[in-house]
Image: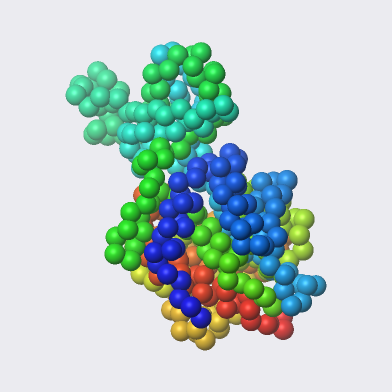
Amino acid sequence: MDLLNYDRLFNTIEELVLHHSPSGVEAEIDRLLMSRFNALGVKAWLDAAGNALALIPGKDSTRALAITAHKDEIGAIVKSIESFGRVQVRKLGGAFPWVYGEGVVDLLGDNQTISGILSFGSRHVSHESPQKAHQEEKPLRWEDAWVETKCTAQELEAAGIRPGTRVVVGKHRKRPIRIKDYIASYTLDNKASVAILLELAQNLKQPAIDTYLVASAKEEVGAIGALYFTQNQRLEALIALEICPLSTEYPIEDGDAPVLLSQDGYGIYDETLNGNIQMVAKRLGIPLQLATISGFGSDASIAMKFGHVARAACLSFPTQNTHGYEIAHLGAIANCFHLLQAYCETEFSD
């Protein structure tokens, strides 16, 4: 098996990161994914829920497996537009304003993208100003922040900026950096996993059973895309690709060893499916960490909880600063690809 080149993997993730895709407004990355799938000559389409799908036919076409990696990202959503171009926003998914800090954000208008400045107010103030409390006493909330655009109401209206407009970190702030064998970037959750799907689309030629590669939509707001797909497609199993938070409360080490979950905030994963994945990892000599985590859910655990699939698993890579400026080892991402490729090519009787 040829090892996945770290430079190529980094470049693919960078390209994905630089295509905005806040939950529900994912057309920019959809165009890229359809172009990449079509260039690889695989059957690909967008379904009614906004999932970007590719099908790799298997030796046994009566059975099917799906691997998901959500393509949407967290951010903010416009609540209201005030005078002098000031815009009030609220969270979209698990986003926090203090994680992004003051700086450029992009407002994805219906007609035009407008850049603005996520703002928290001046620091040279006394207790008479509300910003003083955020220096000493209170955490910063979205209700305490705003976006300065310096546009007129007419300019914002012409751009299609309205309540419901999505807001994400400015594109020039999102470009990943390489730190030795690590990649650091916003939205590795879950663009790095989508990169694994693209590698599978290129390298998985004839899996044991039909394999759907699902770049799922609107995961950060309730796994909406995956629930739609699994309700309409009969599957033997679903494997979600995800980040895994590095924290002192979890027995997970940083590095190139992927993580296989037994439980998350939505419930347990399937032990038989996990056992098969562990068997393949052992055969390949890929180190695999096991964990249960709490403040987390995936396409797989949510679909299994609602009875859409009988068996589900979540394969992930250790990540620092999750839902922030994330850092992950390129080797762990690559090992997820190698493990899944071998798993899909292995014939299981169950």
Q: Determine which quarter of the picture holds residue 177.
A: bottom left
Question: Who's the residue at 51% across and 74% down the image?
Answer: 338
Give how far across and how far down residue 345 sits, in percent: 63, 79
Question: Who's the residue at 21% across and 22% down the image?
Answer: 125
Give how far across and how far down residue 270 sits, in percent: 62, 71
Question: Who's the residue at 49% across and 30% down the image?
Answer: 113
Give how far across and how far down residue 230 sits, in percent: 71, 58
- Asked if residue 193 can be seen in this view, the reply is no
Q: Determine which quarter of the picture holds residue 5.
A: bottom left
All told, the count of numbered labels is: 0
- Asked if residue 11 can be seen in this view, the reply is yes
- Tell which residue pokes out farthest to the right in this image: 62
Camera-nearest residue between 123 and 1: 1
Image height of 130 relative to 284, above or below = above
Quarter of the picture containing the C terminus is bottom right
Horizontal side, residue 249 vs residue 20: left or right: left
Give how far across and how far down residue 204 sits, in percent: 61, 72
Image height of 49 relative to 146, above or below = below
Camera-nearest residue between 296 and 169: 169
Camera-nearest residue between 334 and 94: 334
Question: Who's the residue at 47% across and 58% down the image?
Answer: 12
